[in-house]
Image (cartoon, rainbow, N blue to C red):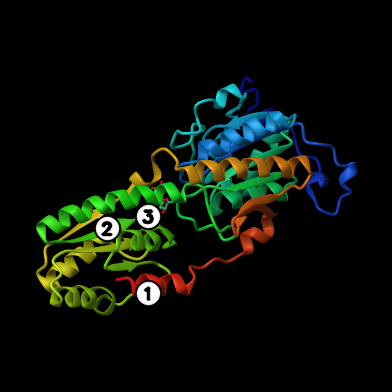
Amino acid sequence: MPLLYDESNLPVISELRAKCYDNVNKDEVEPIKKIAVLTSGGDAPGMNAAIRSVVRAGWNAGFEVYGVTRGFHGLWKGEIRELTKRDVSETLQRGGTFLMTARSKTFMTDAGVLKGARMMEAYDLDALVVIGGDGSYKGARALARLGMPVIGIPGTIDNDISSTDYTIGYDTAMNTAMDCIDKLRDTASSHERCSVIEVMGRRAGYIALNVGIATGAEAILIPEVPYDFNRDVLRIILDGRNKGKKHYVVIVAEGAGSATEIAKQIEDATEIESRPTILGHLQRGGSPSLRDRTTASLMGIQAIDCLLEKRYNRIIIEKDGKISDVDIEQGLDMKKTIPAIDIENAKRLS
Ligand code: F6P
């Protein structure tokens, strides 16, 4: 579809579209005909699988399905095109997101959201499926509050979305980090060094904690638990050295500290050669794991089911191994923390 609309000829949203509110009699609500999907925030392996699922299950349910490029920024600009079932062939196994993604500051303003909603009106979009993290959900919630039906699908490697036990991309990212850390341990062992590895997780230590357990890290530092360098890093390394240990792996989540600084502190205090490695965006790339492909596919189907059943403004979740959905307002208010037992268990293995 050509990009027909600019700021001057966008339709006006005359009234709140009551159809997306729960207290409306569902029989009076017109069924969804045309939907769009976008990816937003940091990319995550499995986002393509989620798009593919929304597109295929959407057409199979009788919807017309459109794709928005560059997240909310693309919605704002009207970068919207039809996505057929063929358009998503060969995307399941690809990393990244073929719709591309962005972190849109403009969209987070009232004017930005209003323009996004008007774009949806202009393209006759009855609903928008947003694949991303909590930040992306806030954009979706803003649209929902203007009367635009939305569905959120959790996509971020950080696993830090409160409403769900699992987010698409987490498993692949952990496996990527684990492979890298195994390799770093090889060379740390050859050189009798300490390898300090920074993994992603600006606000959450899920990757650090679980990859730390999987790679047998001597110390794991996460943002959820304040650490004391002497007690939580130095003492463990010195105890290890006293028992004849010759190399060490320390994992730090980016939100807990800097690998470069911690490596220097360790070297200064112990004279053990220490090398920092920041895994960075490596962790966001790569072909999605089986776990991410299947979860993304099932979550896409759940999103389409919500729309078919006229249950709007929902976010898809995985709880106790089951895929379901919760209200977007409630989902964004939920809190999630790493269970204390997981942290204790990691310590018992060091
Ligand atoms: O995708 C989440 C995340 O990986 C965070 O852990 C990290 O802090 C952030 O994205 C960095 O993303 P970018 O460099 O794209 O802003």
* First along the sequence among labels 1 and 3: 3
How many angstroms separate mark 1 from mark 2 (CA)? Answer: 18 Å
Earlier residue among tags 1 and 2: 2
**Residue 152, percent from left and from top:** 63, 47
Which secondary structure lies at badge 1? loop
Where the C terminus falls, by quadrant?
A: bottom left
Q: Which mark is residue 200?
A: 3
- Quarter of the image holding residue 162? bottom right
In this rendered view, identify the residue nearer to me: 267 or 110: 267
Above or below residue 215? Residue 284 is above
Q: Position of residue 76 (x, y in %)?
A: 59, 36
Res 262 visible = yes
Relative to 15, does residue 249 appear above or below in the rendering?
A: below
Q: In which quadrant will I find the N terminus?
A: top right
Furthest residue to the top?
A: 2
The reply to whether dot 1 and dot 3 touch (C-beta < 8 Å) is no
Inter-mark Cα distance, 3 to 2: 10 Å
In the rendered image, the vertical position of residue 67 relative to residue 190, given as above or below: above
Tell me where residue 66 appears, x and y as whole percent. 64, 29
Label 2 near label 1: C-beta < 8 Å? no
Q: Secondary structure at mark 3?
A: loop
Q: Residue at x 77, y 35 (%)?
A: 32
**Residue 197 disc label:** 2
Nearest the eye: 325 or 258: 325
Q: Residue at x 63, y 44 (%)?
A: 113
Q: Residues within 10 Å of mark 1 (few under 14, many from 20)?
A: few
Within 10 Å of disc 3 (Cα), the crowding (few <14, some 14-19, many 20+) is many
Real-space Cα separation, disc 1 to disc 3, in angstroms: 17 Å
Q: Which mark is residue 226?
A: 1
Q: At label 2, which amino acid type do we have?
A: Ile
